[in-house]
Image (cartoon, rainbow, N blue to C red):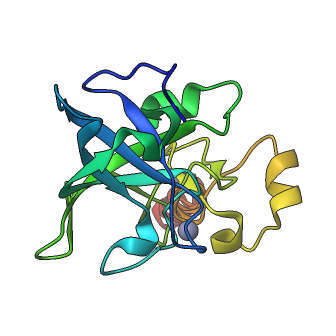
Amino acid sequence: MNSDMSFREGDCVRMRSSKPLIPTYVAIIEEMKADSRDVRVRWYYWPEETKKGRRHFHGSKELILSDHFDVQSVDTIEGKCTVHSLKKYMKLDVVGDDDFFCRFNYNSATGALTPDIVQVYCKCEMPYNPDEVMVQCDHCTDWFHPACIDMTVEEAERIDNFSCESCSLEVQKKLRGSHSATRLPDTNVDTKRRQR
Ligand SMILES: [Zn+2]
Ligand SMILES: [Zn+2]
């Protein structure tokens, strides 16, 4: 089937899947076997295939590099694809069918994702999901999910200026602070009165 397609070690490829729920498998070619039509591959897992399953922050095109290696026939390869870093994926103008991203490695024995510390956003402290609309606070520059700040996605897409709850509280505190400062002249008046 792929006799006219040439693959090299390090290529990311889509592999035919026998499971109806998983439309396609993605793997990276580790080794081309010289005298057969076999390739040694390292699988990317879908979040669904990990012990903790798909979580809220996983993107629809997110793959997780597993520690699971296999030997497969070159004939199960459907074609090449690209597994980007999250940063590069977010800069894509158009996400094609063959564009994926990966930010975690998977330990199949423990079920752990590494790195286990990633930057988190919003009040819910979740890693970034590139599929979701988020609103940025003008003050602290943190990003928020519309649902976490009682906003609809439509409102979030329209909003020009946004200040998150804690930044708004800070602003109010400063305002209150300046109010107490304006009370000082009153005290002066009092002292003057007492001097009379
Ligand atoms: Zn949130
Ligand atoms: Zn803020």
Asked if residue 134 lies left or right of residue 117, the reply is: right
- Quadrant in the picture for the N terminus: top right
Kindly indicate the quadrant of the structure image that contains residue 47: bottom left
Mark count: 0
Residue 139 as seen in the image, left or right of residue 25: right
Q: Position of residue 3 (x, y in %)?
A: 48, 25
Q: In this view, does 82 lie to the left or right of 65?
A: right
- Name the outermost residue toward the front: 35
Seen from this angle, which residue lies furthest left? Answer: 109
Figure quadrant of residue 108? bottom left
* Residue drawn where x is 35% and y is 45% of the image: 27
Q: Is residue 144 left or right of residue 110?
A: right
At a point 37% along the width and 38% down the height, the residue shown is 74
Residue 103 on image: x %, y %: 34, 46
**In percent of the image, x 55 and y 50: which residue is there?**
61
Where residue 128 appears, as percent x and y from the top left, is 48, 53
Asked whether the viewer can see residue 185, the reply is no
Q: Residue at x 59, y 58 (%)?
A: 144
Q: Point out the residue furthest to the bottom here.
A: 52
- Taking depth in this image into account, of 116 and 180 the one nearest to the observer is 116
- In this rendered view, identify the residue nearer to me: 149 or 134: 134
Taking 6 as reference, is 110 above or below it?
below
x then y, percent, for residue 100: 51, 41
> In terms of image quadrants, where is residue 30?
top left
Could you say which is closer to the camera, residue 87 or residue 170?
Answer: 87
Q: Nearer the viewer, residue 126 or 26?
A: 26
Residue 111 seen? yes
